[in-house]
Image (cartoon, grey):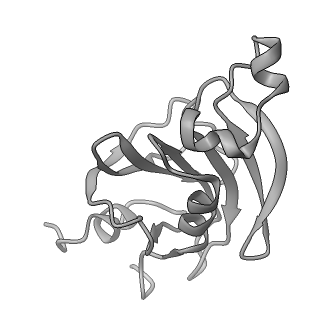
Amino acid sequence: MGSGDPYLDAQTGLTYSLYKPVNTLGLPQTAFKVLVCGGGGEEWVYTRFSKGKKQIEVMQTMAGSHCSDPGMSVKMPSTKVNGISAKVFVYCDPTQKNAAKNCSTAKISTVGGYLLFTLPGYYGMKKVEMQVQGVGGVTYAQLIAIARSMTPASTKASG
């Protein structure tokens, strides 16, 4: 039986806290999946908001789990999201010297990129590792705005 809210339904079977973005740049949700963790941890949650080429993907795993590989990218200086340090990655090809050397957060709008950060658990649940990714014209500033809009998916303790 479902509540009609996929986040609440998924939260029921997890020991880490789920968050959902309030700001999705006006893009509709086009996917919500609970997936097996390839690294052997708890299941992880994948959501996509998209229209045309523009898409935002939010991946959530239990902090410390490694469930998926985001692909080749170049690490940029970290930034702050609501006071929490977030790693910044841009999908510039690190194997091509010029592409890596000329890579910057400004390139996120053309090649894509993501933020990786950990949010605290709530109601006694474990922390969550959050990956907020944008492609197809999503800018660095928009990625940060989406990350800052993460709000707890549950308003009460389950169980």
List the single residue furthest toward the bottom: 156
Tell me how many marks there are: 0
Is residue 18 visible in the rendered structure shown here? yes
Residue 59 percent across, percent down from the top left: 50, 49
- Which quadrant of the view contains residue 149? bottom right
Answer above or below: position of 62 versus 40: below
- Relative placement, left or right, of 41 versus 103 is left
Which of these two is toward me, 31 or 146? 146
Residue 95 percent across, percent down from the top left: 76, 11
List the single residue furthest toward the left: 1
Which of these two is toward me, 24 or 102? 102
Residue 41 percent across, percent down from the top left: 56, 41
Looking at the rendering, in which quadrant would you find the N terminus?
A: bottom left
Answer above or below: position of 79 versus 155: above
Residue found 72% across the figure and 45% down from its top: 105
- Which quadrant of the view contains residue 125? bottom right
Is residue 40 visible in the rendered structure shown here? no
Residue found 81% across the figure and 42% down from its top: 76
Residue found 76% across the figure and 50% down from its top: 87
List the single residue furthest toward the top: 96
Residue found 68% across the figure and 26% down from its top: 92
Which of these two is toward me, 62 or 112? 112
Looking at the rendering, in which quadrant would you find the C terminus?
A: bottom left
Answer above or below: position of 7 versus 88: below
Residue 130 percent across, percent down from the top left: 60, 55
